Image (cartoon, grey):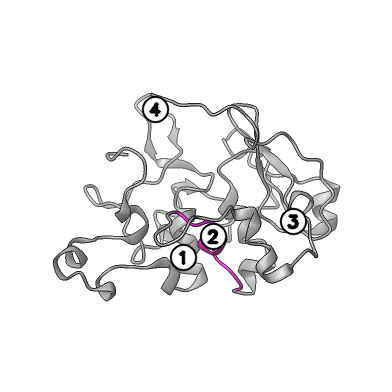
Amino acid sequence: MVEHNTGCERCHGPGGKHAASAAKTDIFNPAKATKEQASLVCGYCHVRKENEHFKSAQGNPREDQPHPVVGETYKAGQDDWRTWYPDGILIPGANPKQPLNQNYPKTDLENAFYLDDLAKQHGFYDSRKHHEAWQELIQSSHYTKNILACSDCHMPHALAKPKPAARETCVACHGTQYDYAKIMPATGRTADNLFMRSHTFNKNQNRPSGPTASGQPTYYYK
């Protein structure tokens, strides 16, 4: 990342034309896009992948996905990163030849998703590692039935009013029918031995939940 944290263009695409005209039509707005397009913007980062096309300085596969054209960057709303060098990157769920119900030994995707009897019974492959939210979301009926995108629950920025907690957005459609803590158990282990909540939205979910960052001390990295 050249910029510290996430800049506007990471989600809205090139902004030069918009900056000059100030017109809303001259910038990509995920809220006005299809659910698939909006989720692709988030999925570019919130996904687990192993990149053989671009290696680290140590010669290991990278975990990010640089633009296939050297000098170019990902353009939200224009680029479909799922199609970039398909033979040089492993992204289960993005490539039909790389299904989520398969394990990938000797890679960073080894044991990345639950493939046990419970997964086969429910048809959902919950994450066992973090950075897999997009791969969980695309399995859900929320995604397959074009009901919602990531930004329908997660507001990256708030303008005129305070940003609501993502867990509070469920009641808009479901009321009190479901308990988010049960539907979304924390299954994906992070580097800090905490867990990220599942995004498969399996209403029959019965996996145990690990400790999440909620209620934990806040860490500030410099």
Q: Is mark 1 in CB contact (under 8 Å) with mark 2?
A: yes
Q: Position of residue 146 (x, y in %)?
A: 59, 74
| Precedes in sequence: disc 4 or disc 3 | 4
The image shows residue 218, relative to residue 80, as above or below, that is above
Q: Which residue is mark 3?
A: 124
Cα separation, mark 2 vs mark 4, equals 33 Å
Helix, strand or loop at label 4? It is loop
Residue 134's label in the rendered image is none
Q: Which residue is mark 2?
A: 150
Q: Tell whether 64 sits left or right of 212.
A: left
Q: Residue at x 43, y 60 (%)?
A: 83
| Precedes in sequence: disc 3 or disc 1 | 1
Magenta: main secondary structure: loop
Which span of residues is magenta-colored?
A: 147-156
Q: Position of residue 179 (x, y in %)?
A: 78, 55
Q: Which residue is mark 1?
A: 38
Q: Residue at x 24, y 72 (%)?
A: 26
Q: Which of label 2 and label 3 is nearer to you?
A: 2
